[in-house]
């Protein structure tokens, strides 16, 4: 594991691991990066949702671009 901070750019695809609100099951959900707040937080949006969320960069996993 690298100690370097990840840097994301607008439009990057990332995977987010979270707990489902009702069932408590672990989910891996795709999100799109809208920008960086600082070195430690990114602004992301989940597909089908108009809300923007700030998310810790350490909890995001880069995904390959769609082809």
Image (spheres, rainbow, N blue to C red):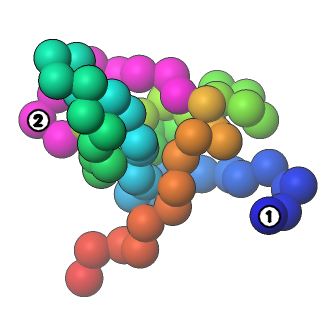
25 and 7: which is toward the camera: 25
Closer to the chain start, of discs 2 and 1, is: 1
Image quarter for residue 57? top right
Q: Is residue 54 magenta?
A: yes
Question: Decide: marks 2, 1 in contact (CB < 8 A)?
Answer: no
Task: Name the outermost residue toward the left.
Answer: 48
Front one among 67 and 5: 5
Picture layout, residue 2 above or below residue 57: below
Task: Please check the rendered image and state whether residue 14 is part of the magenta-colored stretch, yes or no.
Answer: no
- The residue tagged 1 is 1
Q: How many marks?
A: 2
Q: Which residues are magenta?
A: 47-55
Q: Residue at x 17, y 24 (%)?
A: 23
Q: Residue furthest bottom?
A: 67
Label 1: how many Cα within 10 Å (few below 14, some 14–19, many 20+):
few
Instruction: From the viewer's side, name the closer residue of 12 and 24.
Output: 24
Dominant secondary structure (helix, strand or loop) of the stretch shown in magenta: loop
């Amino acid at each position: 594991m690298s100690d370097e901070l990840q840097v994301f750019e607008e439009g990057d695809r990332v995977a987010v691991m979270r707990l489902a609100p009702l069932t408590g099951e672990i989910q891996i959900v795709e999100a799109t990066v809208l920008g960086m707040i600082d070195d430690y937080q990114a602004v992301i949006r989940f597909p089908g949702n108009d809300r923007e969320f700030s998310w810790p960069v350490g909890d995001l996993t880069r995904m390959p671009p769609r082809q």
